[in-house]
Image (cartoon, grey):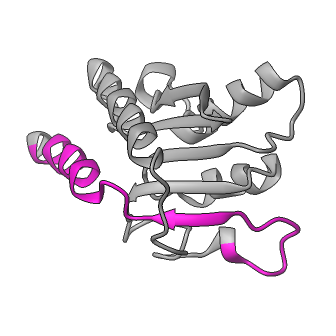
Amino acid sequence: MSERFFPRDDYFMRLALREAERALEHEDVPIGAVVVRNGEVLASAHNERELRGDPTAHAEVLAVREAARLDGSWRVLDAVLYVTLEPCAMCAGAVVLARLPRVVYGAADPKAGACGSVLDVLGEPRLNHRPEVSGGLLADECGALLSAFFAARR
């Protein structure tokens, strides 16, 4: 995992943050994801677990599914996934299976993060694909959105 970011990364993470805010409309954990290729948004999504009653309806999975559908292939090549929270093991597995070459996340997840915090699925040398991972982009803003959500629930 690195903290190497490119000039447009900030812009796309801000789009992911906007997407995360949409999850609040249906009382879901505010996590947003955007899949970008060649500087264009291919797909975006936010958590919809509560809305769909589906434990797999994480922002990353929904965005990757939509990107694959639009591509007409299960491989989402030459794209970047921007997500406001470090992906969990399920979402990291989806990234590996979709062959996404790069993941950029905002806040680290010390309870379920699978990009180095708890597990390192994306860095696992025994898997057939290892994307580049850059973490910590706009981490304070991403984390504040999550903290406010959980504070209101306590």
Q: Is residue 30 left or right of residue 81?
A: left
User: Does residue 49 appear anywhere in the picture?
Assistant: yes
| Residue at far front of view | 7
Q: Nearer the viewer, residue 50 or 126?
A: 126
Q: Is residue 4 left or right of residue 133?
A: left
User: Does residue 58 appear anywhere in the picture?
Assistant: no
Tell me: residue 66, above or below residue 60: above
Q: Which range of residues does the magenta coloring cover? A: 123-151
Q: Is residue 132 left or right of residue 145?
A: right
Q: Is residue 138 magenta?
A: yes
| Residue in the image at 82% along x and 65% along y | 129
The percent position of residue 44, horizontal first and vertical second, equals 54, 27
The percent position of residue 98, horizontal first and vertical second, equals 79, 46
The percent position of residue 87, horizontal first and vertical second, equals 52, 56
Q: Is residue 145 magenta?
A: yes
| Residue in the image at 83% along x and 72% along y | 127
The percent position of residue 73, horizontal first and vertical second, equals 89, 30
Tell me: residue 54, above or below residue 52: below
| Residue in the image at 21% along x and 57% along y | 140
| Quadrant, the N terminus | bottom right
Q: Is residue 17 left or right of residue 68?
A: left
Image quadrant where residue 65 sits: top right
| Residue at far bottom of view | 125
| Residue in the image at 61% along x and 28% along y | 40
